Each structure stands twice: as structure tokens, then as C-alpha cells.
Image (tube, rainbow, N blue to C red):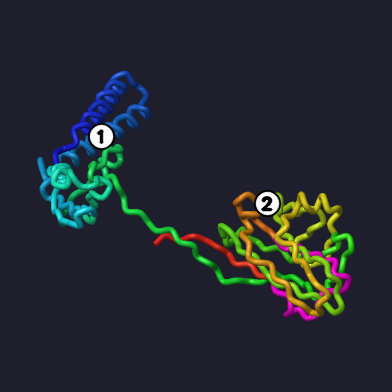
Amino acid sequence: MAMPLQIVTDLQDDRRQLRSLLTNEWQADKRQSLIKQIQQIDTELSVLSMHPADDQHLVDIRLLALCRQCNHQHNISTNPRSYLQEIADWNWKHRFCDQTGVEVISVGRELPAGFDDRLMEKHGRGPWWLTAKHNANIKLVYAASAAPTFTLASLATSSTLLAGRSSAVVDNTTNLYMDYMAGGKITTGTSPSAATIEPWIWGVLNDTPLYPDAITGSDANVSATTRDILAASHRLVSVMVTTATNNQGYYFAPVSVASLFGGVQPLKWGFWVVHNTGVNLNSTGGNHVVSQTGIYATAT
């Protein structure tokens, strides 16, 4: 590869400016700093000059040329010198075809041993045929589902839909999940009325933490102050319309917790459930399921 002249020019300009500053600087510590900078530039110029005068022909770029109209393909092995000409030649051969189906794809490349472009990249002038970097695939990963501490068995009815129960806090300050999926099943008791069950989700307001309204972060009965305060400080997940059927399980579908809070997962959060079915919820703990599944991303 021919020595990148613009990088050399830039380094030489920097060196001249530093030497000019050195001539007019008498403080020992500042002079030492300028001398170190000049020596660093000298080192970089030396490294650049050690590249062979021309090794571009040793760089192998493999191309796959396609024409989807005439259904032809061609494997091309080229180098930075003839790279553009090969593409131009392929386009010329298929100039009468639909150009939306004529393309050239770079499928691989090989560099000569000892080829080092770190200095060029440092100066923002990497070899132009290597500017496209390999892209990682980002995939979602689901952590093992877990159930927060949450005692819903025999939860009393609330005609005003204010007296409910909160789960213990789900703490995300260690796992740092990007999101959680939260869903569950709640079972009515014996001789219920046709009414509603409301699962809500709350999040802390800061890292103190400041809990919303009457929430304490514990698995406990908690009464909201008013419905308006509840609506402003919690996020409604679902309104589950119930019937008079005894011991019927009602499901609320998994939702993204982060989406309930503008797309950002709260540091700490939890559930709050209230109902007005006229009787206590089912007394068996296993008939109630509230689940949360942490979500994070991985690069492959």
C-alpha cells in the first residue's frame, strides 16, 4: 500500500507546529511535554514509512457479481487497484438489464501478513476498501422467569377499588435488565359477583427509593389514596372482567414493563392488585400466578 500521503502531511504539519511552540517555550515541564509529542509523531511517521511502497496487489477482495434479470452470477477476485473497474465492467456487461437487479457483493477479503492500518484508523483515514466493518447480530435473551413475593390468596374485595395488595419490590439495580415481561393469573373465590380485577404495576420515582403513594416495597395490603392518585402513580396492566363462576382463573397477558414507563425500565418496581368481586379471592396460593421475566440483549 502506498504510504497514505494525507496522513503524512497532517503529521508533518503537526510536527512543525509543535517544534515552533518548542522554540518559544522555556518552562521545563512544558518543553518535556512538547518533546514527547514530537517523538510520538516521529514514531508514527517511521511506522508509516515501513509499509512497502506498494502492496495493494497483495490485498485480495472477493466479490460476487449478480444479475437477477438474466440470472447470471460471477465470482471475482480483485484488489483495491482494480476493484472499481471490476464493478464497472460487470455493470457495463449488463447495461441493458434492469439495474435494480444488477449488484456486486463483497463476500470476503484477505490482507497480507503484517498489514497494519491502526495508525490510519487512528487518524480517521483507514483504507477506503475496509471502511465497512462486520456487523454483529443483536438478539434478545430471556432470563429465567421468577415470581415476586406476592400473597394474593384470600385478598378481600374492595367496592371502591382502592384497598388492594402490593407485591414485594422487584429490584433491577443488579441485573440491569433492559425490560421485563410481566403477566399472570388471578382466581376468584366462592360465590363472586360479576365485577373486575385490576392488576397494576408501580415503579420507584428515584434511587432513594421513593415509592409511589402508599407503596412500601413489601408484600402487604396497601390502599391507594384516591383513584386519581392511583392512575397518576401506577400503570394499569389490564381490567379483567369477571363472572359469577366460582373459583375461576382469569389471565392477564404478558406486557413489557418498560413500555408502561415510556420505554425505560424502572430501577425497582412491583405489582398491585385490587378487585371488587364481592368476596375474597381464592384461598389457595397456588391458584394465583404472577410472573416476571427479565430481558437483555446479546451480540452474536
Q: Nearer the viewer, residue 107 or 75?
A: 75
- What secondary structure is marked by label 1? helix
Q: Which residue is mark 2?
A: 207
Horizontal side of residue 158 vs 253, given as left or right: right
Q: Is residue 135 above or below residue 166?
A: above
Tag 2: amino acid: Asp
Q: Quadrant of residue 288?
A: bottom right
Name the quadrant of the N terminus. top left
Tag 1: amino acid: Ile
Q: Residue at x 80, y 72 (%)?
A: 243
Was residue 274 drawn as part of the magenta stretch in this picture? yes
As drawn, the label of residue 41 is 1
Mark 2–mark 1 contact, CB under 8 Å? no
Could you give the CA–CA distance between mark 2 and mark 1, rounded to whole angstroms? 47 Å
- Residue 180 location, x and y as percent? 60, 62
Horizontal side of residue 260 vs 10, given as left or right: right
Name the quadrant of the C terminus. bottom left
Q: Is residue 141 above or below residue 25?
A: below
- What secondary structure is marked by label 2? loop
- Residue 194 location, x and y as percent? 83, 70
Q: Nearer the viewer, residue 118 or 186?
A: 186
Q: Residue at x 32, y 53 (%)?
A: 134
Q: Which residues are magenta?
A: 270-289
Q: Earlier in the sequence, mark 2 or mark 1?
A: 1
- Residue 114 location, x and y as percent? 17, 52
As drawn, the label of residue 53 is none
Was residue 42 drawn as part of the magenta stretch in this picture? no
* Res. 165 in view: no
Q: Residue at x 29, y 42 (%)?
A: 121
